[in-house]
Amino acid sequence: MTGVSRYPLHMDLRVALYQPDIPGNTGTILRMAACLGFAVDLIEPAGFDVSDRSLKRSGMDYLAQAALTRHADWHHFEDWRKQAGRRIVLLSTKAAIPYTDYRFQANDILLFGRESSGVPDAVHNSADARLLIPMVSGTRSLNLAVSVAMTAGEALRQMRSESDSSSRP
């Protein structure tokens, strides 16, 4: 799919992946980040080596264009995040607020947990906001890359809509 950019590609929005398990999901998210103009923080250890073939295949030639920052662990990420003055917005099946009811800000970091286990309680408790993607009863979870696409898309839509309306006379 191709497109013509109508928006600046350097948004302040960031997506953080907490110890992801599946390299193909991470590659897809990095490709999406390069195309949509948001940065990705990888909180290690990941369940794969970043040179994994699946990551490269799913990220295609966009990996070189993706703004990726790797953090050795949660504590290094949290120190960086606090110094940067950014909010953590955790997406979790344990949250109560739908992501579509939340007002995103440009300095937000959308945090997503491991595909296999989410995030530990200490990480959950560090979040400034906890959001969920509403699903049909009896279902457990969505694919990580799909969840990132839905949430980042909504956050970018809100920010771009606000930016567009503030530039009108």
Image (cartoon, helix red, strand yellow):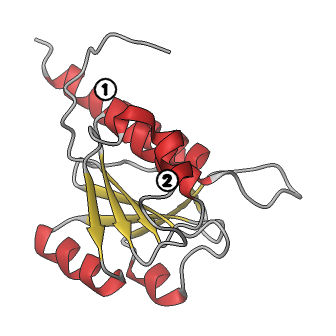
Residue 118: % across, % down = 60, 73
Q: Is residue 153 visible?
A: yes
- Label 2 is placed on what type of residue? Thr
Looking at the rendered structure, the secondary structure element under dot 1 is: helix
The quarter of the displayed image where residue 111 is located: bottom left
Compared to 166, does 76 lie above or below? below
**Under tag 2, what secondary structure?**
helix
Q: Which residue is mark 2?
A: 26
Residue 146 x/y as whole percent: 60, 43
Query: With 8 as the anchor, is 128 left or right in this view?
Result: right
Q: Nearer the viewer, mark 1 or mark 2?
A: 2
Q: Quadrant of residue 81?
A: bottom left
Residue at position x 60%, y 60% in the image: 22
Residue at x 37%, y 65% (from the top left corner):
42
Residue 19 in the image: x percent, y percent? 48, 73
How packed mark 2 is, by other alpha carbons closer than 10 Å (few <14, some 14-19, many 20 or more), is: many
Q: Which residue in the structure is indicated by mark 1?
A: 161
Residue 101 visible in the picture: no
Query: Within 10 Å of the Cα at label 1, are there few (<14), some (14-19), or many (20+) other Cα atoms?
Result: few
